[in-house]
Image (spheres, rainbow, N blue to C red):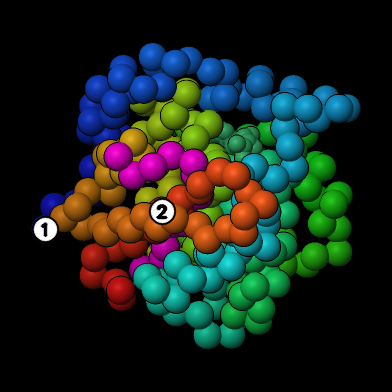
């Protein structure tokens, strides 16, 4: 069996997708300056505290994805990594949803302003940790995790270009412990988003499943939950 693709090979696969999509409709969502300014602004107009789904609803979806595709989960065993956390309380919601099975949540983002706000808001939650990291940087190494949770982060990263997207996806993939699941929430449907994920998670070694998130009628948008796990793992 082949080994996982390196960042250069992933970049090469992503270039055509980028030319067709993100580069054709450029937005500043992939830049550090945009997010740092948004989270530091007093009105926080461009940085809502929760993107897409509410934290508790997303945490329930992560539990479902882990039950279907993950392994492990005895008391105190699960390490979660909340990538591009912003000021989302999903980390706390994960701890509530998984209960004693969850050992810790590392909330990571490249905006120090977001992390400072989140840490203040979740003060007293001992299982929550905070890590300043640019996941689009070359060779970014993240702590090993059994659950990697991404609510709207890949959606922003794609606007940083093919090499940055490749670095992000490789960092996610390479921190996944045996039995781990990467759970990504987005508005983007499979015919648009699967090609991006597949560039780093090749079909010989990884499985990708997309599901529509169940919502009540108060939410007008359709959201998708993508789950990614190793072929040799369960599910
Ligand atoms: C659309 S927001 C989603 C925030 C949060 N996950 C939520 O659901 O509310 C995208 C987040 O990704 C973060 N982000 C974007 N690019 C990043 C990178 N290269 N490294 C780390 N975080 C990044 C931004 O700072 C922002 O917090």
- Of residue 45 and residue 139, the one placed in the foreground of this image is 45
**Please, what secondary structure does the residue beneath circle 2 have?**
strand
**Would you call the spot at circle 2 few (<14 residues within 10 Å), some (14-19), or many (20 or more)?**
many
Q: Which residue is mark 1?
A: 1
Q: Can I make out residue 165 in this image?
A: yes
Q: Position of residue 60 (x, y in %)?
A: 58, 68
Q: Residue at x 72, y 62 (%)?
A: 92
Residue at the limit of the structure toward the left, as seen here? 1
Q: Residue at x 28, y 49 (%)?
A: 201
- Of residue 180 and residue 150, the one placed in the foreground of this image is 150
Q: Which residue is mark 2?
A: 226
Q: Which contiguous range is marked in magenta?
A: 178-191
Q: Is residue 131 left or right of residue 166?
A: right
Work out how far the residue at label 1 is from the one at label 2, CA to CA, in angstroms.
24 Å
Q: Position of residue 85 (x, y in %)?
A: 64, 46
Q: Residue at x 33, y 44 (%)?
A: 190
């Amino acid at each position: 069996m082949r080994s996982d693709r390196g960042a250069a090979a992933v970049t090469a696969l992503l270039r055509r997708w980028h030319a067709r999509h993100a580069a054709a409709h450029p937005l500043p969502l992939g830049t550090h300056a945009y997010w740092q300014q948004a989270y530091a602004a007093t009105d926080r107009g461009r940085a809502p505290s929760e993107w897409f789904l509410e934290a508790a609803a997303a945490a329930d979806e992560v539990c479902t994805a882990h039950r279907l595709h993950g392994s492990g989960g005895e008391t105190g065993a699960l390490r979660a990594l909340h990538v591009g956390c912003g000021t989302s309380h999903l980390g706390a919601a994960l701890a509530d949803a998984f209960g004693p099975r969850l050992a810790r949540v590392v909330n990571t983002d490249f905006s120090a302003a977001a992390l400072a706000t989140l840490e203040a808001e979740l003060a007293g939650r001992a299982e929550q940790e905070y890590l300043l990291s640019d996941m689009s940087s070359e060779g970014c190494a993240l702590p090993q995790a059994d659950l990697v949770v991404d609510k709207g982060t890949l959606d922003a990263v794609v606007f940083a270009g093919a090499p940055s997207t490749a670095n992000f996806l490789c960092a996610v993939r390479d921190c996944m412990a045996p039995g781990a699941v990467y759970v990504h929430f987005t508005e983007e449907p499979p015919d648009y988003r699967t090609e991006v994920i597949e560039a780093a998670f090749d079909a010989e070694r990884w499985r990708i499943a997309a599901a529509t998130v169940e919502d009540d009628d108060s939410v007008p948008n359709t959201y998708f939950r993508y789950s990614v796990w190793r072929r040799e793992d369960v599910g």
